[in-house]
């Protein structure tokens, strides 16, 4: 996902962006006295590699050398925050390696999203209030981050996860001089310059989940999201689609990799827990205009 906003503060963009941690780390923490140094702790890391292609000629994909997904779970604590206000994020890199740079545009990355984000509040009587408070731009308009089934994760009509609205379809790829380097913060955007080699990657940083400072009652952001990122032959994808995924046949994907961001604040345990399944609250009917 590219954006996070709240219904109450539509200019706030903290949770979803296509860069690295620098945007979050630069945020100050309400002027509180520093109690802990800034830290970024890796909770877990996994790499999923596309199996070797043995029938590339039959499938017309011999230009594609390899694809992999690298997923890292991260705990972030700002310099001026108390330890219980640490936030949890998921850093994803989807790496596409083709034989030469000219072949990059022969393939396209499409991302699918399911689940929800919600705010929770511990009321003074001990009960917990939950509300769908977070939105993202989806097919041109802002909608709740609440999807009962998988939808294409795009802000506009182009299904490509690398498309930059009104610009190029591949502009949100990143690359480094060293193809093995996945440093997203210092990488070059595809729209700034084309790589001299055939290795590019799509970067997503999903967060920030955890306890919220400055509220009267204990209040938290919670994420219960499942995502799937897929590589297609560009010839199997439409230039535009809609919310019904018109023209996008997932069965034609060359390969897909699943990942998630399921972190929830548990008021009873007084810490963030990582769930294995989508929270049942995501199926609750929403109220209001979004």
Image (spheres, helix red, strand yellow):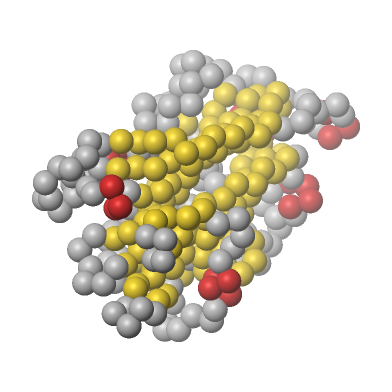
Rendered image quadrant of residue 135: bottom left
Identify the residue at horizontal 41%, vertical 48% (top origin). 88
Residue 193, compared with residue 282, is above or below; it is: above
Residue 222, compared with residue 63, is above or below; it is: below
Which residue is nearer to you in this view: 238 or 202? 202
User: Which percent across, then down, holds residue 243?
Assistant: 60, 66
Identify the residue at horizontal 36%, vertical 50% (top origin). 87
Q: In this image, 44 relative to 149: left or right?
A: left
Rendered image quadrant of residue 126: bottom left
Identify the residue at horizontal 42%, vertical 82% (top origin). 289
Which residue is nearer to you in this view: 104 or 70? 70
Residue 191 in view: no
User: Which percent across, then down, holds residue 164?
Assistant: 46, 46
User: Which percent across, then down, holds residue 79?
Assistant: 21, 40
User: Which percent across, then down, holds residue 110?
Assistant: 62, 47
Identify the residue at horizontal 35%, vertical 36% (top origin). 40
Which residue is nearer to you in this view: 257 or 122? 122
Q: In this image, 268 relative to 173: left or right?
A: left
Residue 54 in view: yes
């Amino acid at each position: 996902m590219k954006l996070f906003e709240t219904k109450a503060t539509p200019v706030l963009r903290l949770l979803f962006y296509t860069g690295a941690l620098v945007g979050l780390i630069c945020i100050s923490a309400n002027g509180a006295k520093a109690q802990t140094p800034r830290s970024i702790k890796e909770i877990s890391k996994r790499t999923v590699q596309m199996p070797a292609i043995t029938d590339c000629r039959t499938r017309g994909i011999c230009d594609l050398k390899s694809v992999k997904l690298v997923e890292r779970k991260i705990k972030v604590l700002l310099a001026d925050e108390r330890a219980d206000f640490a936030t949890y994020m998921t850093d994803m890199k989807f790496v596409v390696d083709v034989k030469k740079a000219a072949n990059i545009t022969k393939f396209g990355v499409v991302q699918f999203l399911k689940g929800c984000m919600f705010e929770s509040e511990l009321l003074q009587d001990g009960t917990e209030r939950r509300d769908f408070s977070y939105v993202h731009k989806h097919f041109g308009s802002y909608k709740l981050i609440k999807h009962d089934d998988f939808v294409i994760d795009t802000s506009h009509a182009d299904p490509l996860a690398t498309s930059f609205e009104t610009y190029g379809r591949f502009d949100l790829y990143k690359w480094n001089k060293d193809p093995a380097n996945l440093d997203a913060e210092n990488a070059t955007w595809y729209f700034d310059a084309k790589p001299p080699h055939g290795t590019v990657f799509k970067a997503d940083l999903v967060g920030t989940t955890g306890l919220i400072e400055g509220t009267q009652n204990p209040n938290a952001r919670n994420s219960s999201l499942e995502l799937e990122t897929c590589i297609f032959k560009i010839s199997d994808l439409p230039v535009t689609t809609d919310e019904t995924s018109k023209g996008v046949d997932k069965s034609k994907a060359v390969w897909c990799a699943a990942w998630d961001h399921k972190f929830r604040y548990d008021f009873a345990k007084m810490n963030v827990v990582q769930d294995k399944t989508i929270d049942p609250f995501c199926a609750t009917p929403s109220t209001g205009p979004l």
